[in-house]
Amino acid sequence: MHFFPILSTLRRHRTAAALIVLEIALTCAIVCNAIFLIRDRLSRMDRPSGVAEHELLRVRLTGIGTQTDASALTAQDLAALRAIPGVKVVAATNMVPFGNSSWNTSVSTKFEDVEGTSAGVYMGTPDLLESFGVQLIAGRDFTPGEYIDFDELHPEKSHPSSVIITRGLAERWFPDKSPLGQPMYVDGKEPQIVVGVIDLLARPSEASPERARYAVVLPVNASYTLGGNYVVRVDPERKDEVLAALGPTLDKVSPNRILLDRQTFTDIRREFFKADRAMAYLLVSVSLALLIITALGVVGLASFWVQQRTRQIGVRRALGATRGDILRYFQLENFILASVGIVLGMGLAYAINLWLMHKYQVERLPAGFLPAGAGLLWMLGQIAVLGPALRASAIPPAIATRTV
């Protein structure tokens, strides 16, 4: 019932109303996209690795100078690490999920296929799959006779005869049949035969959740110089104890090396997603700041209008308007302004998302984020205007009618 009088009042205060509408529109556009990006970052940070994270430790080290005895030294390291109380199994590998480096190659069912799939390549000593704790969902692990040394790899002479692939690659290349026994070109001119399928072994340094599922494991013995990673699977209750013993144990085998890191997998994940976490915090801060500024703008404008309309409010009270009528008047006025700003903000949010898609390859903003943002701003507007509206409704008619 107050709709048309409110519109008439707003036309007389075009500038102030337009500024609030613009502020709400900008806040709606930015907050909708910020919340979407925050969700995207959080989902990225929660990406599964496929490994037994709560049981894993990683040691990263490097040699000093040329390591002519790297393979023998690796065997001694593994034996020493296995002897630590609380260690279940250990292996050397070229890389770990969410690690600091990534080995990749193009894989396909055809040789030199230009449409091949880029996949991460894991290599390691026997027991690598057990050390990672990955789930073998089909086929088998490598046999001892299938392993070759990394130094023996040669495109023309020696290459692995078998390969284990992830479920993601199996679904990509063998959607209608079992991948077991199928040829796949991973290394060299001759194909490797798929002997096993693992559920997941995340590909390091890959931003896309879909492409992060593409990885292969080759039966190639990796010495500690190949990536410098030892993966140690431990009893979770003794994790700290084992972590403290890793450095002294390796130093006893050979002190002529540099121990770069001793980490739990929780530390690896935290370090890898440090930038995403910082971005999420930044976006949360920006969103909260915009919402606070918008709320203060609504409070300020409503307070100004209450002061300007004191006599008008008093006249209405004298003519029989209740406190509830005055309260609803200001709430409806704010709702109209917020609605106009939100409609404009939705269009602006979509435009910003299109720009982000083109510039930074983000995903399309889901339609559900727009009504969610609209609801948030409507609720914020009603809460912000409540204080000034209550003050307006509390003005006594007698005092208001004497105000000049």
Image: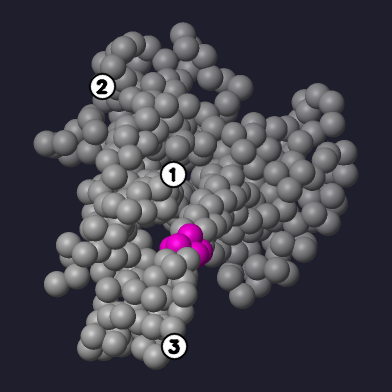
The residue under label 3 is which amino acid type?
Ile
Q: Is residue 148 magenta?
A: no
How would you rate the neighbour count of disc 2 (Cα within 10 Å): few for under 14, some for 14-19, many for 20 or more?
Answer: some
Residue at x-position 46% and y-position 36%: 206
Please name whichever residue, 340 or 326, is drawn nearer the observer in this view of the structure.
326
- The Cα atoms of the two marked residues, 1 and 3, are separated by 72 Å
Front tag of 3 and 2: 3
Label ID, residue 109: 2
Front tag of 1 and 3: 3
Residue 141 in view, yes or no: no
Q: Is residue 281 above or below residue 181?
A: below
Highlighted range, magenta: 296-302
Label ID, residue 202: 1
The residue under label 2 is which amino acid type?
Thr
For the residue labelled by badge 1, is the local secondary structure a helix, a strand or a loop? loop
How would you rate the neighbour count of disc 3 (Cα within 10 Å): few for under 14, some for 14-19, many for 20 or more?
Answer: few
Residue at x-position 75% and y-position 57%: 246
The single residue placed furthest to the left in the displayed view is 176
Label ID, residue 399: 3
Please name whichever residue, 249 or 241, is drawn nearer the observer in this view of the structure.
241
Q: Using residue 10 as the reference point, say whether residue 73 is left or right of it.
A: right
Name the dominant secondary structure of the magenta segment: helix
Q: How many marks?
A: 3
The single residue placed furthest to the top in the displayed view is 156
Q: Position of residue 49 (x, y in %)?
A: 45, 51
Label ID, residue 353: none
Q: Toward which corner of the image does residue 330 lie, by quadrant?
A: bottom left
Q: Position of residue 358 (x, y in %)?
A: 36, 26
- The Cα atoms of the two marked residues, 1 and 2, are separated by 21 Å
Q: Using residue 371 as the reference point, say whether residue 121 is left or right of it.
A: right
Q: Using residue 199 as the reference point, say whether residue 95 is left or right of it.
A: right
